[in-house]
Amino acid sequence: MEYWRISPSAILRAVTSTIAIVGGTGAEGRGLARRFVQAGRTVIVGSRQAERARAVAGEINDELTTSLVSGAENAEAARPADVVVLTIPFEGMAEAVRPLAAALEGKSVVSAVVPVEFVGGVPRLLHVAEGSAAQRLQALLPESRVIGAFHHLGSHTLADLEQPVAADVLVCGDDVAAKREVMALAGELPGVRAIDAGLLESAGYIEAFTVVLLRINRRYRAHAGLRITRLPESALAGDEA
Ligand SMILES: NC(=O)c1ccc[n+]([C@@H]2O[C@H](COP(=O)([O-])OP(=O)(O)OC[C@H]3O[C@@H](n4cnc5c(N)ncnc54)[C@H](OP(=O)(O)O)[C@@H]3O)[C@@H](O)[C@H]2O)c1
């Protein structure tokens, strides 16, 4: 099966909802943008510089032979979007999102941010007073519905469009409707199962485990992902925790 092809049903989905990616010019944001487009979503790549965002959008459109991707400065990208995904480094997060608060009001805002530093090449989790990057984001954006997701999908895996993503995505959040929306979105990626990982406070454990995954990948020179085993498939179709 050629996973890079955009199916007719996916093209239909594109007209119904738009995803903005704040920090979409980086490795993770580009990877998610490609995969969302592959799933038929319309994507707006965000950047601190509109020109850079437009250039990345053009590259993705050329690569996927589509016009589903546009680029804009972060706030302009977020404003018309239904769901906004944040893929910027933790260090710049607070400063970057404050000016976006109005554009993000009432929206589902997905944090894939991992508070990590590399000491001599070894990843370490940074302490976050609120418990996690996602919880800090919720504190910064009280009028938005913050959801944690996509932490365990590495940019290398996302970039290889010839292969399905083939991994589980742990999704956590306090707003049930927003969590369902993001789970549905994650489930559109090829080979991805979205798993309800509970309330937003789970983000601390999810972010921390990403550091373990990074260490495993460093040890084995791999791009491993995550699979949760022995969950009943019937339950996966249904309720949140
Ligand atoms: N890379 C992965 O495999 C991976 C996997 C899972 C989760 N994540 C998480 O996803 C996030 C992005 O990862 P990445 O590897 O794509 O990072 P990155 O390339 O270093 O940064 C992504 C984008 O964020 C913007 N940015 C950088 N510094 C910023 C700052 N101080 N303030 C505002 N915007 C800034 C830049 O866009 P502009 O310069 O165009 O504004 C950059 O292209 C991180 O939080 C990371 O923990 C990454």
Image (tube, rainbow, N blue to C red):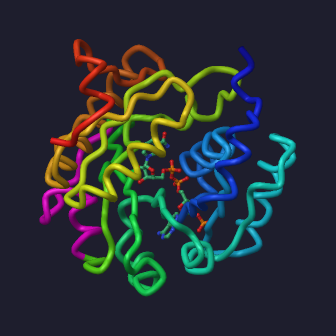
Quarter that holds the N terminus: top right
**Compared to 25, does 82 lie above or below?**
below
**Compared to 188, does 14 lie above or below?**
below
At x 18%, y 60%, the residue is 128
**Compared to 191, does 100 lie above or below?**
below
Quarter that holds the C terminus: top left
Give the quarter of the image for residue 57: bottom right
Q: Nearer the viewer, residue 86 or 210?
A: 86
Q: Give the range drawn in magenta.
A: 123-139
Membership of 125 in magenta stretch: yes
Q: Where is residue 55 in the image (x, y as percent from the top left)?
A: 80, 62
At x 51%, y 23%, the residue is 191
At x 30%, y 77%, the residue is 141
**Compared to 138, does 114 lie above or below?**
above
Left or right: residue 196 versus residue 3 is left
Q: Where is residue 121 in the image (x, y as percent from the top left)?
A: 39, 36
